[in-house]
Each structure stands twice: as C-alpha cells, then as structure tokens.
Image: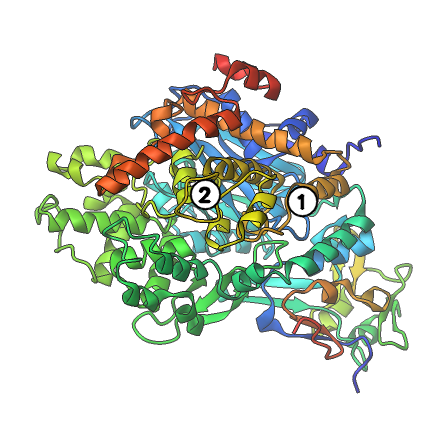
Amino acid sequence: MGRQLDIDINTPNCTGCHICEMVCSLYHENVINLDKARIRIKDKWDESLFVPHICQLCESPDCVEACPMSALSQDNGGIIQVDMELCTGCEACVIACPHEAIRWSDEFKRLFVCDRCDGDPNCVKTCSVSALALNGNNRKA
Amino acid sequence: MAEKVEGILCQKIAYIDLSRGTVDMEVVPLEWHRRFLGARGINMHLISRLTKADTDPLGPDNPLIIGLGLITGLPGFGSGRYNITALSPLTGPSKNRPNIGDANIGGHFGHEMRHTGFDYLVITGQSPKPVYLLITNDHIEIKDASHLWGLDTWETQKVIQREHRDERMRSLCIGPAGENVARMACIITGPKDAAGGSGMGAVMGSKKLKAIAARGSKDLAVAHPDELLRYFQEQQDILMERKWIKALGRLGTPLMLAIAVAGGYGAGDEKTLMGKAKEEAKGVFAENLLPYSLGHSACAGCAVHCRHRYLVAEGPYAGARGEGPEYGALHALGLALRITDPKEVLYLNGLVNKLGLPTQTGIHVAQAIKLYEEGIIDDTMVDRPLKFGDIALYESLLNDIAYRRGIGDILADDKFGYDRLPPEAQKYRLSSIKGAHNVVDWGLTVREFVFGQITSSLPGHVHRSRTGLGVLGLPAEVMQKIYDGHPVSPDKHSFDGKAYMTWWHEILYAVCDAVGCCQFQTVMNSPNAPKYEEYSKLIYLATGLDMPVPYLREVGERIYTQERMLLWRFGFGEREHDRVPQGWIHSREQEEERKKFDGLLDEYYELHGWDATGHPRPETLKRLGLLEMLDG
C-alpha cells in the first residue's frame, strides 16, 4: 500500500539540473550545498543518464533494521527519523539501503535522509520534468 | 539597508602561474562586483589590466581566466553560466598579436567551482610538461597530467573522476585539438558544453594545461534564503509556462533551423543550403532528431533543459552518443557539409566534442573541399580526393585538424593557414569581421541580426545582441513598450529603430552574462522573460547588494564600453570595423543595404556615448569609471 508522501521516481525524465538538491539544502540548511541535500542525483552523463536517489519510505526499512545503535526509526508516515546522538557513522544503514537513498557525510559527520519537507517536498515542487512525483500525482504532466 | 559582505561576496580569485608553479589568492574585491558584477564583466576588467596590445595570445603572458557570474550556482534563471576569457589566438591582426577572446559556457563546472570557494582563476605562464589543476575547498594544486595527455575530452573527465573516486568532480578540459594548439580549439566540460569561438582551447593547450578539475563542498550562503527559495519557485513557475521556453525545452535550439529556413536567413552563403534547398534542409530539422533522443539534459540549476541526450542505436553510426546538437552544429556539421541525415550530424557532433573542436570546424572542412574543387588544394597535398558527402573524409579531416596532420595542419591555423596555400586561395577566403575569419554569411535579411554581428564587441559573434523579437511579428506598440518607448520596427526588413534595438540587447546581455544567467532566459526570444528587475531582486536576495535597475543598466554600459576599448587597443575598434564585410555583398541592392547599415552607426555610437569614429568619448569613460583605459 502506498504512503501519502511516496515519491515516484521517473529516471528517464531527469535532466540532471540538480535543482532538487539545491532547493533541498536551501530549505533545510539555509545554504546551497549539494553535499547537504537529502536527495541525490547521480550524474552518468557519459551513459546519457541521470539517476535520482531519494528515500522510498520502505514498509520494512532495511536501514532501520541494519542500525546497530538503534539510531534510526520510522514514523507513522514512513519517514526515517535519525537520532544523531546515537549515530556513530558506521554506515551500516548506507550499505543496507537498496535505493542508495541514505547518505553519511564524513565531512559533516551527519546522516542525510529525506524528511519530505513537512509534507510538501521542495524537490517535487521544483522538478520541471516530473522526474519526481508525489504519491502518483504527476504535477507537471 | 546595510549591505552584507559575506557568502558570495567572500569568494576568492586565484592567480596561478604555471611557469613558476605558484598559486596566489585573495578575496575578490567588492569594488569589482559593484562595477562589473562578475563573469564577463570582471574577466574583461582583468584582461584590460593584465594584457597589452602586443601580448602574444599563445605566449605565457596571456591570462586564461575562468570567471563565474555573480549568482552562478543558484537554482533557476539559467544560472549555470560563466565565462572563459583570454586573448584570442584566432582573430588577431597577425599570428602573434591578439584580439578579444571570450566564451560564455554552461554545464556543471561553474556550480561546482563555486562550492570550492573560488570564483575566478587567472592562469598565466606555460608549464614545461602537461599538468592539470585540482581545485578543492580553498585549495589549488598543480598536478601532473602526463597520463591524461592524448586522451579525448570524455576520457579525460572520466579518468580524473576515477582517480579521485568522486563522480561529482567536474572538469574543464581540452582534447587533442587543444593539445596540438589548433587555433580554433575549444574547452569542453561534460559531453558537449564548450567554450568555443575564440580559441580558448588553444590558449589552454599552449600552457600545457590539460584540465581544470573542481570539487567543492563549501556552503554557498545567500543573504535571504527563505525569500530566495520562494522567489525562485515563483519565477520558475512563470517561466515554464512561456511558449518559447516550452518549445525550447522540447526541441532545443535546433528549433531555430526551421525558422531560419522559412525566413531564408541563410540565403547569403552558397555553402549554406538553408533558404536555398528547403527540402534537403528538412532532413536535419529538430523533429527529425527526436527519434534519437533519450530525453533531455540541462545545465546546473536550469529547468529549461534545452538539449537532448541522444543515442544512435543502429546502422553504421550505432553507439554514437552525446548531447545536443545545437542549431549551429546542424549548419556547420550538417548543411554546410551537404549532410541531411541526422545520424551523420549526431556522429560528427560527438566526434568534434571529443576532439575538443568547436562544431564550427565543419566550415573549415567545407572550405577545404571548396578549395580542392577549385584546384587550389591539389592531390599532392591530400591523400584522397576531397568531396562533399564523404563522411569518412569528414571524420579524417576533423581528426587531421585536431592532430595537425597534413592539410589539417594548415586548416588548424584558420585564417593564418592561407599563407601556406597557393596565392589564389585568398580569393576564396570567407569574410572577416574584426579579425574573425570564417564568419558565415547568413544574408542581410534580418537587419538587427546583421547589425548586431558586425558591431559585436566579440568579433563576429552573434550572442552579444542577437534577438528573435524582430521575427516574431509582434505589434508595433508592443515593440515600443519593450524598447523603453523607443519606436522599433517589428519588420525584420526595416532599418527603423534597429540601432536602438541592438544597443538595448547589448546592454541587457552584458548584464545577463555578468550576473551568470542564460541569455535564453532573458529577453531574447520572449518579451516577458526576466531582465533587470528580476536580476536586481535576485542579486539582493543572493548577496544583499542593492543594485536598482538604472544601476544595472549603467553596469551593462560599462561592460560593453570596456570591451570596445579593448577592441580599440587591439586594432579593431574603428568605424571601418563595424561595416558589413564586402564578401557579403552579392548585388547592387545589397550594396545599397550596406549603406543603410552604415547609416545606423551614428545613432548606435551616440547611444553608447562613443564619437562618430566609434571611439568612446572621454566623458563617457569618465562617467563609467573607465578613464584609465585610455592609457592602455
């Protein structure tokens, strides 16, 4: 069963503009920094491919399961909650995630995972090509 | 409100001397931003300070400057743009004398460099061995590139990424063309974004600089983040509803080919089938490229995505992959070479991008075939007959130019190569504008196109002022409203108001480039696109600087007149250099039209504050704070 804040990814549509990452960091961090974004676009330009990676709000999230410190939990909406007091940066969750959607930064000593921007994800709002769509709602189509 | 000096305004400029192996850096002076905003504006300011009339463009003293726009790195407004500027080895009065060189470029490198903390790289000297620059957070390293030398532009970028185990590392690099100092060589980033037209790749190659790799993770702090996010979303929603943007986002710049053919704009050049052979030209119309599209691609921060990712799946060119092609490539690598099969254009487009040649190199190939047909290049100079329609030959000649082999060595010298051809070759030379050779004759039909090109502060280059507003058939009152109440004829054949129109776009695009926005997203082909008002707000939200509309317009004037002074310094700033080239005149009627273009100059100069000879007046220089340029 789908969740209210499911984000569908339509990879062929992604143009690699990285706006989603910019607005994500701007919204959460008050700065533009793709390394602090909760969404990640892998840019494989030599293969003509741009691949979005964002938390899929799994029903039984492997990341939560894998965390040896119980630093991760999932709320009722499916959003992964991170307790940075408990997180040791072991990256077990990063390895476990099948969607490559949770990321540890050695530089910033933090985990980055999508929190759906209080229910109105900025990445979806600003994706001009519907590579990202909220709960099947292809807003720009 | 007090101005905040932080974030973008704390970025650095690095002076890198490849001869000595040194790097010096400082914060970009705020005064430069106030006077020139960034990118093209500051780059040209540096050129004016660091070069002389006799600086050898392929010598150690020619500074290669990478300069970001004031808001490069933000989401929206086509803010992936920046400028690469140096003295051009392609358009000077002689082999060792310079002219202005500059290229506005997109892709992702600019955004990445901004996060390293550097906004400007000024690279001088010449390394004794191949090197590349590694730009990371507040740090620059000159690294050995002997293992990269000889690689094409795609391989170079991928090897650097693999070496540093970082897929987010972005590089500017040269291919074999730049390494061998083919004068027209360009700099490439990603699959196709190019700094072309001025030989910037040749300058980079002359310095033995193979690549500049950037990877930054520094915060880009903006003055008003919440408001900026809201403003970006609001403006993007408006932008994406524009008809022009929708068409550009679907077809890319190739959409302009059909418009040009329908209008007969390419009728002047016998090698340009456009306007002369409409049916053949349709083979490479935008719609016929769509079957090879895998989807779109965009520069960093741009929602418009004006180029396709393409793949040729089968046939002799199976596996040809890349991005584009742009409108210019459809001409130079298509129609000018008598190609009307899109697969062949796509193949050659990928080839030149990997070699580090501009797509315009197709014109050189066409010219060589023409000279062979005329018996000026004979069989003793080539290893096979040169004839149109031979794709393997095109491939071979493009490689020969990049590697400077055989006849390719002569072609790689562009206009200077004619000295090594039989004297009768001279009469087949293409027209020159301000030293820029191989300027294609598109016909005199659209007056503002022609006038903007002949007066352009970047020799022969159209993107200092070109606009499609004059071919949209807008009502006269709408045109008048766009152009500050000044009457500008909506008829492309009319000369009325075209001096004002050209001047107006020159000033706007100077600001657009310096801000770091894409010209396709300003008033180029859509009258309601962002311009000064939006830039003013954007600059305030991003930097805290208060730059009202009249202030920005004066900055645009300053940037443009600064470039005119540089042209003057290099010997191309006289009235005679602003004339329609004689080679474009094919009839008595066109001779009369040429006089009318001449007639526009007085008003055009007056608008710029230049005298009747085309020299900026001292009072104009004083008003714009450029008096010191009189000494240089």
Q: Which residue is mark 2?
A: B145
**Left or right, B399 with reference to B104:** left
The secondary structure type at the circle numbered 1 is loop
- The residues bearing labels 1 and 2 have C-alpha atoms spaced at a distance of 24 Å
In this view, B530 is above or below B318: above
Asked whether residue B15 is in view, the answer is no
Q: Position of residue B601 (x, y in %)?
A: 42, 29
Kindly identify which chain the residue marked by label 2 belongs to: B
Mark 1 or 2: in front is 1
* Residue B115: mark: 1
**Residue at the limit of the structure toward the bottom, as seen here:** A1
Q: Which is nearer the N-term, disc 1 or disc 2?
A: 1
* Residue B456: quadrant of the picture: top left
Q: Residue furthest top?
A: B631
In percent of the image, x 17 and y 49: which residue is there?
B370
* Image position of B443 (left or right of B371): right
Amino acid type shown at disc 2? Ala
In the rendering, at what x and y percent does residue B631 appear? 49, 12
Percent of width and height locating residue B473: 49, 55
Q: Label 2 crowding class (10 Å Cα cut-off): few <14, some 14-19, many 20+?
A: some
Q: How many marks?
A: 2
Label 1 resides on the chain identified as B
- Quadrant in which the N terminus of chain B is drawn: top right
- Figure quadrant of residue A121: bottom right
Residue at point 69% right, 73% down? A99
Are the residues flagged by discs 1 and 2 from a single subunit? yes
Closer to the camera, B323 or B459?
B459
Question: Does residue B172 lie above or below A99 as drawn?
Answer: above
Label 2 residue SS: loop
Q: Residues within 10 Å of mark 1 (few under 14, many from 20)?
A: many
